Image (cartoon, rainbow, N blue to C red):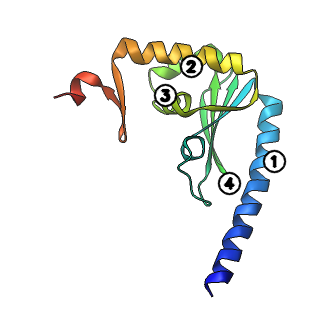
Amino acid sequence: MYSRWLEALSEVARLREARFREVLRELCSRSLVVVLFGSRARGDNTPLSDWDLMAIVEAGEYEIEAKDIGQVVWLPLSRLAEVLEHSMIILDAVADGKVLCGDSRIFEDVRDKVSKYIRERGLVRTRDGWFPGSIIRQ
């Protein structure tokens, strides 16, 4: 029975991986850069972990889109400063990010701006999120 469960798990993982590749191809054709973040980027994923992706585009709306493979965070470069003021997920995406396709120099520029934002605000990452370092030390 255990071997049948493992076979089923392997098949589900294979099908999900194939679907991920389809979604990635679509995103790569529509974005300047696509970045993997979350458990799969950090390497602490399981076979059933979802894929967290950030699609960086020139302009448009900031949006978090639920997909069957996980989430896609749409980050318009033209609104980066505004998005940073109300979305901590961007901090995680940049901290963990691994470029999957597109111009990695664009992602490095975003990483530099986000790092500056983190430094200026004295933010510290914990397992519960990003907080001002002054609060963490108390």
Please tell me whether mark 2 or mark 1 is closer to you in this view: 2
In the picture, the disc for residue 111 is: 2
Within 10 angstroms of label 2, few (less than 14), some, or many (20 or more) residues? some
For the residues marked 4 and 3, what is the alpha-carbon distance in whole angstroms? Answer: 23 Å
Q: Quadrant of the N terminus?
A: bottom right
In the picture, the disc for residue 22 is: 1
Up-down: is 88 above or below 70? above
Please tell me whether mark 4 or mark 3 is closer to you in this view: 3
Image point (74%, 50%), residue name: 20
- Residue contact at pointers 1 and 4, CB within 8 angstroms: no
Most distant residue in the bottom direction? 1
- Residue contact at pointers 4 and 2, CB within 8 angstroms: no
| Residue 103: image location, x then y, percent | 75, 21
Residue type, numbered disc 1: Glu
In the picture, the disc for residue 68 is: 4
Residue type, numbered disc 2: Arg
Image point (20%, 27%), residue name: 137
Please tell me whether mark 1 or mark 4 is closer to you in this view: 1
- Residue contact at pointers 2 and 1, CB within 8 angstroms: no
